[in-house]
Amino acid sequence: MYDFAYHKPKSVADAAAAVKKASDGKLMSGGMTLIPTLKQRLAHPSDVVDLAGVSDLVGIKVDATGVTIGAMTKHADVASSADVARAIPALAALAGGIGDRQVRNRGTIGGSVANNDPAADYPAALVALGATVTTNERKIAAEDFFKGMFETALKDGEIVTSVSFPTATKAAYMKFPNPASRYAMVGVFVAQTASGPRVAVTGAGPAVFRVKAMEEALAKSWSADAVANVKVPAEGLNSDIHASAEYRAHLVTVMAKRAVAAAG
Amino acid sequence: MTISVSMTVNGKAASGNVEARTLLVQFLREHMGLTGTHVGCDTSQCGACVVDVDGASAKSCTILAVQAEGAKVTTIEGLAESAEKLHPMQEAFREHHGLQCGFCTPGMVMSAIDLVKRNNYQVTEDIVRHGLEGNICRCTGYHNIVKAIVAGAASMKAAGV
């Protein structure tokens, strides 16, 4: 790891100022992706700005309309929140399946969405539930937020402060985890939302995407059989040592079936 | 960038000057001389480096020492009451032969204790097998580790630790 200047500001405003002032500043939340990236010398930031000192980024608020999770809230705390489990059980279950226990004890929702790893779990929940990402500057709809592989709508120095999820009448997430890394080779989040059924896929492509054909099928009949015959094309999907694009395309249908069945 | 860090390690105040890039595991092993915490994969997958940071298990190869500023850290060296009296979980690993080469053992024991406490001392084989997702052992096949943790949970409850 190359060395860097370390900052631990106490407010979002100070954090944003520190990143802007640095020649190549990087924000750090849980560090579960950033630290391995630095260790491999894949990044060489001049400054690392640790958000762990910004206490008002931590916390979970639940009301009748949905769940708002502070950006620095850890996966383990979302997974074990009785309020989240009551309001959107699929979201608590998703958080409880990220990485392993030790990763969940450090990794945060804000870090996960800002990083936008193609195999991260949270993006599927955000897009399927129609969540809103709040930053220090604006509110961004989840579908406009995730742009591509490790790319988001965030501008330099813009900081995710919270994510708000509306409740859904039905929802479930099913993934086929890589047996070693636990990253989703394919993960499918299905939700029956106020604007109809939504199906979001992570792990399969460069970034999270919706499967409109499955959503239309579910609008006609909410059942695992409805999505069983909907295939997604392999073209453009990820192909690597873990799975070919064709296999990932196949898994999308399998995981969608399981998710609809689990959602009930 | 050199930074002064202070934390509590195994109940004692610990401080030192480190580079910003110094990992917690390097601070523990190289500055504190606590070499019980191992570096296995160095990519946050194997769990040999697991320590307890403020009541939650964490992989010390993926935490900067400066992130642990002010934290209470417990390592494998901080578990036993004395040289003669091991922690009940360590004793259970010995009793059930939950190790062969022993390299993964410090991390296994640290994760096991966190797992047992989180599950209110009631663990089943299934809970243990899933709970150990972040710890890899290359020799035992896990069977005796799982047996040790189930037994260790009962011993921890009985001993009130």
Image (spheres, rainbow, N blue to C red):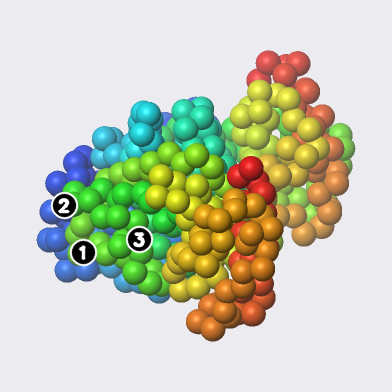
Label 3 Cα neighbours within 10 Å, binned few <14 / some 14-19 / many ≥20: some
Question: In the image, what residue occupies the spot 73% across and 25% down?
Answer: B122
Q: Which mark is residue A137?
A: 2
Return the x and y of residue A244 as percentages of the image width and height.
64, 80
The answer to whether residue A36 is visible is no
Look at discs 1 and 3 and give the one toward the viewer: 3
Question: Residue under circle 1?
Answer: A155
User: Please, which chain is the residue tagged with disc 3 on?
Assistant: A
**Picture layout, residue A247 above or below residue B116:** below
User: Please, which chain is the residue tagged with disc 1 on?
Assistant: A
Question: Residue under circle 3?
Answer: A143
Q: Which mark is residue B47?
A: none
The answer to whether residue A23 is visible is yes
Q: Quadrant of the N terminus of chain A?
A: bottom left
Q: Type of residue at label 1?
A: Lys
Answer left or right for B43 relative to B15. Answer: right
Q: Quadrant of residue B46?
A: bottom right
Is disc 1 on the same chain as disc 2? yes
**Mark 2 or mark 1, earlier in chain:** 2
Separation of marks 2 and 1 at Cα, in angstroms: 10 Å
**Mark 2 or mark 3, earlier in chain:** 2
**View extreme (bottom): residue:** A235
